[in-house]
Image: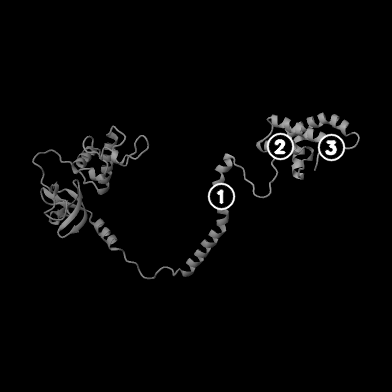
């Protein structure tokens, strides 16, 4: 709709006043700047759509345009009144103003919070879309499973060979050494290395048996001994010549040996002065030590990092200190 010359000047003055103030948001400032350029270009011949005119009327607080003989007088009298009322109404409703809905292809808000929450909104939309299909698929799978379920088999189950051997081994777990200073070897056979010697009456735990050799766990660790020097009965040990009492020490179990090795590893790592004793440790910067650890470098301090690093002599000294 066209405007009169007085109305056009009034609108341009109001737009300039609002643009110089700090009461506008980004959208309102852009809208008024666009209106100012259009009025400056076309003047009274400026044509606006109904939504544009309503928004401009709301921001500027313009009253109805006077017509007839009293146009010039009414414009002079009502100009100051309309400006004051428009500014007051604009200051009151500034927080409630929103940009009108745009038709067609328009951009959404580019605020940081809107961008940051975009993945969360996408996940919620995907969950809403996939909820009922997932429920349907699970229901169909449950029906098919119940339809093809043949039930428990009537044939009796037999215990596995490993379970049977474990039961038999537990029934006779501990054996006693019947010879004096019997060698404990690393494997079943005289060609294997000697780990140490056990005296008569020493108690060991049986693990396996193979071709006249028995796998045992003793104070020397996991090894093998000739079955002829082992018995389930405790042998009679002659009293020592000296009256000094002999303290009987129980042979540690495999669990106790494993716990002792872990304790030795912890003590060795704690005694290291640096931050990278082992490859699996993390340095002060939060990085994995790897090949930079003291264990990986030859020479110098050699911490104990793995169970294979714990020697039998160190185990014996550890158990001796514990007792």
Q: Is residue 67 left or right of residue 232?
A: right
| Residue 322 as seen in the image, left or right of residue 67 | left
Can residue 248 be seen in the rendering of this structure? Answer: no
Q: Nearer the viewer, mark 1 or mark 3?
A: 3
Q: Residues within 10 Å of mark 2 (few under 14, many from 20)?
A: few
Q: Residue at x 21, y 57 (%)?
A: 208
Snapshot quadrant of residue 154:
bottom left
Contact between marks 2 and 1 (CB within 8 A): the answer is no
- Residue 20 image offset from top left, x and y in percent: 69, 29
Mark 2 vs 1, N-terminal side? 2
Q: Quadrant of the N terminus?
A: top right
Q: Earlier in the sequence, mark 1 or mark 3?
A: 3
Determine whether 269 is above or below 175 in the image.
above
The mark found on residue 65 in the picture is 3
Residue bearing the label numbered 2:
37
**Contact between labelled residues 3 and 1, with CB atoms less than 8 Å apart:** no
**Distance CA(mark 1)–CA(mark 3):** 49 Å
**Nearer the observer, 124 or 30:** 30
Q: Residue at the location (19% across, 44% down)?
A: 312
Q: Is residue 193 left or right of residue 322?
A: left
Query: Residue drawn at (73%, 31%), measured in percent from left and top?
Result: 16
Residue 183 in picture, x, y percent from top left? 12, 50
Instruction: State whether residue 52 is above or below residue 273.
Output: below
Q: Mark 1 Cα within 10 Å, few/some/many (few <14, many 20+)?
A: few
Q: From the image, tell me which residue sits under label 1.
A: 122
N-terminal-most mark, 3 or 2: 2
Q: Give the quadrant of the C terminus.
A: top left
């Amino acid at each position: 709709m066209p405007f009169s010359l007085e109305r056009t000047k009034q609108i341009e003055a109001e737009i300039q006043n609002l643009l110089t103030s700090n009461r506008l948001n980004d959208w309102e400032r852009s809208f008024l700047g666009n209106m100012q350029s259009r009025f400056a270009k076309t003047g009274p011949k400026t044509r606006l759509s109904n939504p544009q005119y309503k928004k401009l009327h709301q921001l500027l607080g313009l009253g109805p345009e006077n017509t007839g003989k009293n146009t010039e007088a009414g414009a002079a009298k009502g100009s100051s009144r309309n400006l004051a009322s428009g500014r007051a109404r604009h200051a009151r409703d500034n927080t409630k103003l929103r940009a009108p809905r745009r038709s067609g292809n328009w951009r959404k808000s580019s605020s940081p919070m809107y961008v940051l929450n975009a993945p969360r909104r996408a996940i919620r939309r995907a969950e809403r879309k996939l909820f009922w299909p997932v429920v349907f698929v699970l229901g169909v799978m449950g029906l098919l499973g119940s339809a093809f379920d043949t039930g428990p088999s009537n044939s009796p189950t037999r215990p596995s060979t490993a379970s049977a051997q474990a039961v038999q081994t537990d029934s006779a777990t501990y054996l006693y050494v019947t010879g004096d200073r019997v060698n404990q070897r690393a494997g079943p056979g005289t060609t294997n290395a000697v780990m140490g010697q056990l005296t008569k009456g020493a108690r060991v735990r049986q693990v396996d048996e193979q071709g006249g050799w028995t796998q045992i766990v003793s104070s020397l660790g996991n090894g093998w001994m000739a079955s002829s020097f082992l018995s389930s009965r405790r042998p009679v040990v002659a009293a020592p010549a000296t009256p000094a009492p002999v303290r009987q020490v129980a042979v540690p179990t495999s669990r106790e040996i494993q716990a002792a090795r872990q304790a030795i590893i912890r003590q060795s790592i704690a005694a290291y002065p640096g931050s990278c004793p082992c490859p699996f440790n993390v340095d002060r910067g939060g990085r994995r030590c790897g090949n930079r650890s003291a264990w990986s470098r030859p020479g110098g301090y050699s911490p104990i990092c793995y169970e294979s690093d714990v020697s039998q002599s160190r185990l014996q000294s550890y158990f001796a200190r514990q007792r």
